[in-house]
Amino acid sequence: MSSKDLTTPKQICEMMELDYTEIHPSRKIRGTEQVESIEDGHFHEILTKGLHKNADGNWKAPLPFKTDTVILPDNKGHCLRRLLSPKRRFLNDNKLKHDYLV
């Protein structure tokens, strides 16, 4: 008993391109619709409001991922330990100190 294949070459190409819908953004494939996330909407809004041409004729865009508030960790203790580690080694090993400083 044999079965007849009813798929056309066009259907096979469409199935192969399902993962690559960005190749044909105007083509609507049922089940592959994408919804814009809140972050995507915020990103799009920042770029559309801030995109402009400067006096030289170059396009300038804002940095959408830049935040005004920068929070740096308090790592003073770690830095001091790293700074004092070679000092302790130099105090214990005069040859190392001489090799390092000369």
Image (cartoon, grey):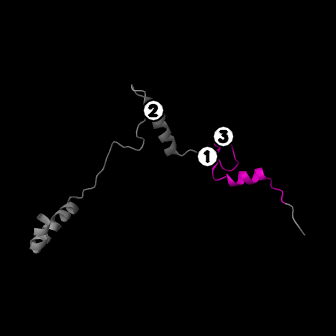
Residue at 61 percent of width and 46 percent of height: 22
| Residue type at tag 1 | Glu
Work out whether 88 lies above or below 38. below
- Image coordinates of residue 78 in percent, x first then y, are 22, 62
Magenta stretch: includes residue 15: yes
For mark 1, give the secondary structure.
helix
Q: Is residue 76 above or below residue 26?
A: below
Residue under label 2, please give it: 51
Q: Is residue 37 above or below residue 77?
A: above
* Residue 95 pos. (x, y %): 11, 73
**Quarter-of-image position of residue 82:** bottom left
- Which range is magenta? 5-33
Prevalent SS, magenta region: loop
The residue that label 1 is drawn on is 22
Q: Is residue 35 left or right of residue 102?
A: right
| Pointer 2 local density, CA inside 10 Å: few below 14, some 14–19, many at least 20 | few
Q: CA distance from mark 3 to mark 2?
A: 24 Å
